[in-house]
Amino acid sequence: MTWRASVLTLFPEMFPGPLGYSLAGRALREGRWALEAADIRGFATDRHRSVDDTPFGGGAGMVMRPDVVDAAVADAVNRNPGAPVIYLTPRGRLLDQGLVRQLSAGPGCVLLCGRYEGVDQRVIEARGMLEVSAGDIVLSGGETAALLLLDACVRLLPGVMGAGASAEEESHGPEGLLEYPHYTRPAEWQGRQVPEVLLSGHHAEVARWRRAQAEEATRTRRPDLWARHQARNNQPHDRGETGRLDGHPAAA
Ligand code: ADE
């Protein structure tokens, strides 16, 4: 079955955007995944086709109405049954490669992109949406976060990356390490040499050097990932992914 992404947005023309190019674009044309971007405004019911209103309690900005958003979600869920409904928001759990792997292994996803101050909390709760953030940054809307999430998921779909590519050794792979650095010709460039071991032809030594580089990069750049990697390697039991999309421990 085709992995299906249903995006709900006020700016459907933003899609596929960058996902129409390179690996994701080719896979989309080959039918390895499907994308539909629906205009939330199409579900407005009043004369002015309004999708937002002022916040109860006062304050700046506008809030997207629960009735309009719910109608848009209902339509998307109908066309994409079984797919988790995700609301992109800086209040959500951080997107990481573990969640990306889980999503890409599923049937697809429904992605709700907010604008303005966001979406009325009641529809988020009523629909049991998973709230996901693209990082500890504030974007002008959920669309760029949705593009980022889709890019990460689609490249993991069968046949998208092609033979030779490996999701094992890259950063944030199953080992939880950043990737080692890469070099190509020329062997000397602006007085800088490629590390000698990479020219040696000793596969075992190259592998050892890459492993050491990956560990050093992770330790110095991402002490958070390094601590988790070490804890996992020193644990007799698997403390890895829980299998739950929200990242909470699985029920006993
Ligand atoms: N919308 C605005 N900021 C966002 C973020 N960091 N992640 C997801 N959606 C957003």
Image (cartoon, rainbow, N blue to C red):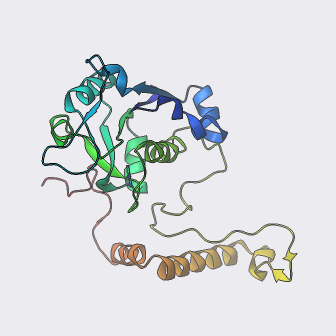
Q: Relative to residue 251, is residue 42 drawn left or right? A: right
Quarter-of-image position of residue 130: top left
User: Is 90 situated above or below 123?
Assistant: below
The front one of 236 and 156 is 156
Q: Left or right: where does residue 66 sit relative to residue 101? A: left
**Is 231 drawn above or below residue 78 in the view shown?**
below
Q: Residue drawn 55% across and 78% down?
A: 217
Q: Quadrant of residue 249?
A: bottom left
Q: Height in image: 189 above or below 7? A: below
Q: On the rendered structure, is 213 left or right of 184?
A: left
Question: Residue 252, position in %: x, y?
Answer: 12, 55
* Residue nearest the observer in this picture, 68 or 127: 68
Q: Residue at x 49, y 43 (%)?
A: 147
Can residue 15 be seen in the rendering of this structure?
Answer: no
The residue nearer to you, when weighing 49 against 105, is 49
Position of residue 33 relative to residue 171, above or below, is above
Quadrant in which the N terminus appears: top left
Q: Determine which quarter of the picture holds residue 160.
A: top right
The picture places residue 93, in percent across and down from the top left corner, at: 30, 56
Residue plotted at (48% across, 60% down) = 173
Q: Nearer the viewer, residue 50 or 205?
A: 50
The x, y position of residue 219, in whole percent, is 48, 81
